Image (spheres, coloured by chain):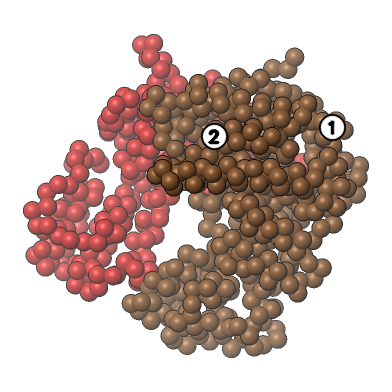
Amino acid sequence: MIDLTRKLEILADAAKYDASCASSGSHRKRDINGIGNTEGMGICHSYTPDGRCISLLKLLLTNVCIWDCGYCVNRRSSNVQRARFKPEEVVSLTMNFYKRNYIEGLFLSSGIIQNADYTMEQLILVAKTLRERELFGGYIHLKAVPGASKELLLEAGKYADRLSANIELPSQEDLNELAPEKTVTEIETTMSDVKFGIDDSKDKAETSGGTVTFARAGQSTQLVVGASESSDATILTKAQELYNQFRLRRVYYSAFSPAADTSPKLRVRPKTPAMREHRLYEADWLIRHYGFKSHEITAGVANGNLDLEKDPKLAWALRHRHMFPVDVNRASKSLLMRVPGIGVRSVNRIVSARRFTRIRLEDLVRLRVALNRARYFVTTSDHNPDVFRLDRANLPDVFAPRLAQPSLFADVMPVSVISGEI
Amino acid sequence: MIHASVENNFESWSSAARRFLSGGVPPGQIVWTDEEQGSLFTDSPASTNSTALSVPPAFVKLAEAVSCFDDSSKWPLLYRILFRLKTENRHLLEIESDADVREARIMEKAVNRDVHKFHAFVRFRRVEVEAEELFVAWHEPLHLTVQRATPFFARRFGTMKFSILTPNGCAHWDKKTMTYSEPAARTMAPDADDTEEFWRVYYRSIFNPFRLKIKAMKKEFPVRHWPTLPEASLIPELIREAQSKGS
């Protein structure tokens, strides 16, 4: 019998491969007799030396699993030590941590025990106990187990702020190779059921004037990058499709790295560079916030993979120099969004300020534009001595090797903290 | 030159600023100084607007935040912006390329960040006082943010009795109302809580030693806060272990 400390070690360790730690996007008032609320903004209560934030108590209920997904340390054939929490143990850890202000709430996932429905029921039991008995008003993220019944998913969404079914790999071919028990159809059916719950709750809220009560912070998913041969173009096309089809809030990308318990099939694969994951997050931002389509970002890149040396917006701009320079005093918002070094918020500052003043080069610094990139792509009300380089064949050299300062990893911090400006 | 002596809070400054503005006093003629006896805390929000002045709500929002910035250069800056709003351009705050606006935005951002870190880094320790549960935290904010940051804890932990002690003043919640008191010393806060060992186990286990990013961590997790966080003392050994794994 292993004690609670050891269980916590095993089941937190097993949970860390789920990158999401977001706790934003949900609004819930505290029950008058209860503890905990959500106010929309995520809070990172701590950070570990891997640069990731700790916002939620992220645990597996158990790392016992009947499935055998090659990329997963908890798969059936792996040698890791197994453990299983009692639901009460998770409830009490969550409440004790929350009352001390260590966390915003709980992110509970699980290996598959018996079958999808049974696993989902166990997750729901924890969330239900927290909400109904402990009157817990903090954030709860539950894993939506692919293949669980619609009824169970609709129950989970009553208690959870967020649900996530992980797609893991971008195509059925990849799944066949590495996760033989999983099918894209089944995972997408789960996403579709969750979307139904969200839409239904929105409709009811609109007709009755109430608030959305089902998975208020929406649903998300995660992809493993580099465990299969699939290119960034394939991954981003899939991500965009998922955003459009199921209105996911986020797609998370997790760089595959072979570990001691890695499946023999994958031991031969090289470690995925962290920069690849980083570029995918940047491209993902461009799709969600900058009006880019995935094919624009990946058209013309070598082997369908993003340039690791340059951020994808800069790389795109260098391939489309005929669209520049952009006049910051006149250009449309959507065109300003395409300028390397000008983020969404800087665009808004520019559009606001130029109603009252003419914008000069030095003003751009105060408007928080990254001039090291933007200066080659814009004209201002005064002379910009660098814009002539736009037509020079050697312009890309200006940005090599790493002048384009990478912004922090998108998964390191929740949206409230990172700027996501590229 | 006019010497304006104000307490270190928004209400005191704004009532003085209102008087100067209605008298048309230009910014260059005022020397702002902090009142020595001034309290960090005010009991009631400013209600005395005998000389009612309409300023954009955006300015009030900005000024309330900037007032918590721990540097007295905030007072002349705020008055300069207020004066320019009235005499030069009522849309001044929308021009973020303006040097005064930019400076105030930097202060506002620093204060808001401090409030955010306040919400993030308070660590309660549970004690029992006369058989009643009480949660006490010691936190060291960078700016004068006790009053701005603590209502959050009452909304969230309304059914818990708590005290947050800081070198800039303290906040006490008795499950009904918040009261504020003068600065405290760290020794007044409890130094242990049984749950901390589980928290440290969690912190150690959720860390992924195969992706060490110390700079990224320090950017959002400033070293100056580490001494008040029970998990932070693990950081050096976690980094050493990760490095020996060759990440």
Q: In which quarter of the image is residue A94?
A: top right
Q: How far apart are marks 1 and 2 (CA)?
A: 31 Å
Question: Is residue A13 toward the left or the right of residue B196 in the image?
Answer: right
Q: What residue type is labelled 2?
A: Lys
The residue at the point 64 percent across, 82 percent down is A321
Q: In which quarter of the image is the N terminus of chain A?
A: top right
Above or below residue A113? Residue B65 is below
| Residue B240 in the image, given as x and y percentages of width and height | 70, 40
Tell me the colour chain B is drawn in. Answer: red
State the SS at label 1: loop
The residue wearing badge 2 is A158
Chain letter behind tag 2? A
Task: Decide if residue A12 is in sight here.
Answer: no
- Residue matched to label 1: A76
The relative height of residue A59 versus residue B53 in the rendered view (above or below) is above
Picture residue at 38% right of the left edge, 38% below the top: B152
Chain A's colour is brown
Indicate left or right for B30 with A202 as reference. Answer: left
Give residue B119's position: percent from left, percent from top.
43, 40
